[in-house]
Each structure stands twice: as C-alpha cells, then as structure tokens.
Amino acid sequence: MELKKLTNDSPDIEVLEEINVEAIPECERNSLRSLMDTGATVLGIYDDRPVGFLVIREYKNILYLAYLAVNSILRSKGLGGKALEELVSNNPDSMIVVEYEAPNLSSPNNELNNRRKNFYKRNGFRETGYNTFYDDTEFEIGCAGIEFDVELFGEFTEYLSTIVSDHIPKPYKKA
C-alpha cells in the first residue's frame, strides 16, 4: 500500500473521481480537481492500482483529514487503516485531525457513526473531548500524532472559512 500525491493531470484522477462519486454523499462531495484548486492535497491510495484517496487540508502543523474514501468493493480489507498508518508515520510532527459524526442514539445512522468512530480509534486517533456542529450535525474531533491544540484548530477553522465559506466549524467541549 502506498500514498501518492495527485495533481489535476494525474493519470488516475478519473478512477479516483469514480470512487469519490460512489463513496461521498452528493451533499458533501466536491470534485478532487476542485479540492486541489482550493489548495487541498489529494493523496491516492494505491494497492497495485488506485483504490481510494485521502483529502488533506494543511495549516501550520495541522493536517486536517477532510475525506477518506476506498472503493466499495475493497472496503473492510484494511486499506483505509493502512493509509492512515502511513499518513501518521510520515508526519510525526503533525497534529492530524479528523471529524466524524458523533454517535447519537436518536440518529438513524447511529450504527454507522459508531463504526466510523471506532475505525478511527482503532487506527490511532484519540478522542479530544471536543466537538463541532454544522449542517445540522454534531461531529466529534479525533486526533493522531501530536497532542490536540484547540486554539490552533480554531485558527485553522478561521483559515478554512476563507476557502470554504459554508464550512465554519467552531470547536467546543460538551458539558
């Protein structure tokens, strides 16, 4: 398994766009090219062929994992976990942050939300005790690498709002 940085003219971009369409809900999806055009880094996940991707936003020593997608046929085979392991091991001085929907017993997606949270925990992400709320959904913040710095993450969200105006999460601690 290998991670490769993609560009707008990478030969595998169309294959990864197909995975993007299949894996990311339409209301949350952006084309990989448009993400790169706004400064995001797209890393292809390769296992002899392109099998998925990570989309990263960088700010100071934060690597914000905006998207992780693996071809549906190949899910639950450890590829996503290996990609996260590689990302973390290649960036030992970074705070790698992810947001996942907070488990909520009243949510029809609660089982899926728990699976996502447990996936990140199994793959080295710690609970930070902080949450965000946007698009009528509460998210938990997970972190791998160096310790989570809520003030720096707040700076990052302010920076992100200059790029993605409809995505302005503010971290908070639940009472």
Image (cartoon, rainbow, N blue to C red):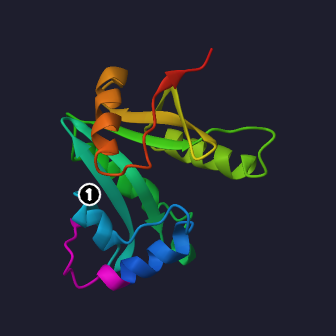
Asked which quadrant contains residue 140, the reply is: top right
Task: Give the percent coordinates (x, y) of residue 134.
Answer: 55, 42
Q: Is residue 103 above or below residue 7?
A: above
Q: Nearer the viewer, residue 157 or 65?
A: 157
Q: Position of residue 10 (x, y in %)?
A: 21, 80
**Residue 67 image-quadrant placement:** bottom left
Q: Residue at x 21, y 65 (%)?
A: 5
What is the x, y in percent for residue 55? 34, 58
Q: Looking at the image, which is closer to me, 18 or 151?
A: 151
Query: Which amino acid, mark 1?
Result: Ala
Where residue 92 sits: x, y (%)? 22, 37
Q: Is residue 82 left or right of residue 117?
A: left
How many marks the image carries: the answer is 1
100 magenta-colored: no
Alpha-carbon neighbours of circle 1 within 10 Å: few (<14), some, or many (≥20)? some
Q: Which residue is mark 1?
A: 40
Q: Residue at x 21, y 47 (%)?
A: 90
Q: Is residue 11 magenta?
A: yes
The magenta segment: 3-14
Q: What secondary structure is found at the residue carrying circle 1?
A: loop
Q: Is residue 175 left or right of residue 132?
A: right
